[in-house]
Image: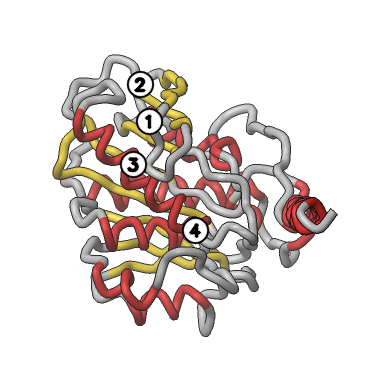
């Protein structure tokens, strides 16, 4: 019994933590828009999966790929970094819309959130770095432009994409949608990584967002800590969870004053136009 009891106790604790995490950050089912709220480009989008057997954190993982069918390479790359049980389909219209304009969009899987995993955020950053390496080596498929590499993320995914840029200095642009902080950063140090970020960024924020307020909140913290230049766009009447497609988390946001489609349209179009400008992509 002396040997078995500690194992049983540990199992109970881990099981309890899993229940708490699932309740705090549940995985919501897909809830797609019928069509993109934003302006779409000329390319049909192919969505596919790439399975990687040797993940950088020691376990297999997958990458959801949105590829512009028939686009001539080398292609610009946009990688979306997720955290806290966020799923790729929460931002389906962003991914599909950017791909329709000729971007190769990559969304590496995020690991299930575990408070007892003291390397949780580090694992996400490691997989994002590996995804970039796979893309630039041609392992994902299309030939990509090594001078047109961008990354971004929503909420906690915002700073995680910044941490990735602190290590992957080949990134050329960053996009932060309503970036928010974590009470703990598991396995990464903002003080060490933020000063290394050299890529310019755009912050797309919501006027009514109390999770990532446009003034006096976490976006200001990031802007002060990261030496690279940045632009900021505040969407009037926008709330935090309307940066996602519909989920049960909507009840946790302030009441927005614009529709989700209006907020997504502004956020997606602004993202694409800013990336085009950074990469000198002429749409005329």
| Mark closer to the observer (2, 1) | 1
Q: Badge 1 local density, few (<14 within 10 Å), some, or many (20+)?
A: many
Q: CA distance from mark 2 to mark 1?
A: 7 Å
The reply to whether callout 2 and callout 1 are in contact (CB within 8 Å) is yes
Query: In which quadrant of the rendered view does residue 12 lie?
Result: bottom right
Q: Mark 2 or mark 1: which comes first in sequence?
A: 2
How dense is the environment of label 3, judged by Cα within 10 Å: few (below 14), some, or many (20 and up)?
A: many
Q: Residue at x 85, y 53 (%)?
A: 1
Question: Are the residues flagged by discs 1 and 4 in contact, CB closer than 8 Å?
Answer: no
Judging by the rendered image, the residue that carries numbered circle 4 is 119
Q: Nearer the viewer, mark 2 or mark 4?
A: 4
Q: Nearer the viewer, mark 4 or mark 3?
A: 4
Asked if residue 100 lies left or right of residue 260, the reply is left
Residue 232 in which image quadrant? bottom left
The local secondary structure at tag 4 comes to: loop
Of label 4 and label 3, which has the lower sequence position?
A: 3
Residue 190 image point, x, y percent: 39, 73
Task: Give me the disc on residue 99.
Answer: 1
Note whether 201 is above or below 229 in the view shown: above
Q: What number is the disc on residue 78?
A: 3
Q: Is residue 265 above or below residue 99?
A: below
Measure the alpha-carbon separation of dots 4 and 3: 25 Å
Q: Which callout, 1 or 3, points at the residue further toward the start of the chain? A: 3
Which residue is label 2 attached to? Answer: 43
């Amino acid at each position: 019994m002396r040997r078995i009891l500690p194992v049983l106790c540990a199992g109970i604790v881990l099981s309890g933590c899993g229940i708490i995490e699932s309740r705090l950050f549940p995985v919501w089912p897909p809830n797609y828009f019928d069509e993109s709220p934003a302006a779409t480009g000329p390319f049909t989008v192919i969505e596919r999966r790439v399975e990687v057997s040797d993940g950088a954190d020691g376990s297999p993982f997958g990458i959801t790929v949105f590829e512009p069918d028939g686009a001539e390479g080398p292609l610009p790359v946009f990688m979306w970094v997720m955290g806290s049980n966020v799923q790729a389909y929460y931002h389906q219209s962003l991914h599909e819309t950017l791909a329709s304009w000729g971007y190769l969009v990559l969304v590496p899987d995020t690991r299930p959130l575990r408070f007892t995993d003291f390397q949780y955020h580090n694992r996400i950053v490691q997989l994002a770095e590996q995804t970039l390496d796979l893309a630039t080596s041609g392992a994902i498929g299309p030939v990509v432009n090594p001078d047109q590499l961008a990354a971004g993320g929503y909420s906690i995914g915002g700073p995680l994409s910044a941490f990735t840029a602190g290590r992957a200095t080949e990134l050329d642009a960053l996009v932060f949608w309503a970036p928010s902080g974590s009470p703990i950063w598991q396995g990464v140090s903002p003080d060490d990584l933020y000063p290394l970020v050299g890529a310019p960024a755009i912050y797309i924020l919501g006027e009514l967002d109390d999770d990532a307020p446009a003034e006096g909140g976490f976006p200001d913290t990031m802007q002060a800590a990261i030496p690279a230049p940045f632009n900021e766009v505040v969407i009037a009447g926008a709330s935090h969870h309307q940066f996602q497609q519909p989920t049960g988390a909507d009840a946790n946001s302030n009441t927005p004053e614009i529709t989700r489609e209006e907020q997504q349209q502004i956020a997606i179009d602004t993202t694409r136009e800013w990336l085009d400008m950074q990469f000198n992509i002429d749409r005329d």
